[in-house]
Image (cartoon, helix red, strand yellow):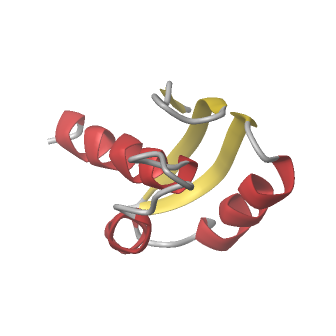
């Protein structure tokens, strides 16, 4: 299980697993429960690079980031550490 602590958003933690380059067991701790459960469900089984492309740069209101954007950062960090 991978663990990431997002910055500048309501969620406190993102947990996820990767199997053969695909996401599984994505969970956000804290934040907007329904929206984050929806994101988790939508990205389940997707390729990491596709998720990064789709979620990177999304903003929440006037913030410079969002929970989806923070998840894309978590995935980029994971890819970098996995090299």
Of residues 4 and 47, the one nearer the viewer is 4
Point 36% across, 62% down: residue: 56
Percent x, y for residue 16? 57, 43
Quadrant showing the N terminus: top right
Percent x, y for residue 5? 50, 25
Question: Where is 33 relative to 49, above or below?
Answer: above
23 left or right of 34? left
Point 55% across, 54% down: residue: 60
40 left or right of 73? right
Residue extending farthest left: 83
Percent x, y for residue 25? 67, 49
Q: How many marks?
A: 0
**Residue 14 lies in quadrant:** top right
Point 39% across, 41% down: residue: 74
Of residues 20 and 77, the one nearer the viewer is 77
Point 45% across, 28% down: residue: 7
Residue extending farthest right: 34
56 left or right of 66? left
Percent x, y for residue 27? 69, 43
Quadrant showing the C terminus: top left
Question: Where is 35 relative to 29, above or below?
Answer: below
**Residue 31 lies in quadrant:** top right
């Amino acid at each position: 299980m991978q663990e990431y602590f997002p910055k500048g958003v309501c969620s406190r933690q993102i947990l996820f697993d990767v199997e053969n380059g695909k996401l599984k067991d994505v969970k956000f701790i804290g934040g907007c429960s329904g929206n984050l459960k929806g994101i988790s469900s939508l990205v389940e089984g997707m390729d990491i690079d596709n998720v990064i492309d789709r979620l990177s740069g999304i903003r929440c209101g006037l913030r410079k980031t969002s929970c989806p954007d923070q998840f894309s950062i978590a995935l980029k960090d994971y890819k970098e550490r996995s090299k």
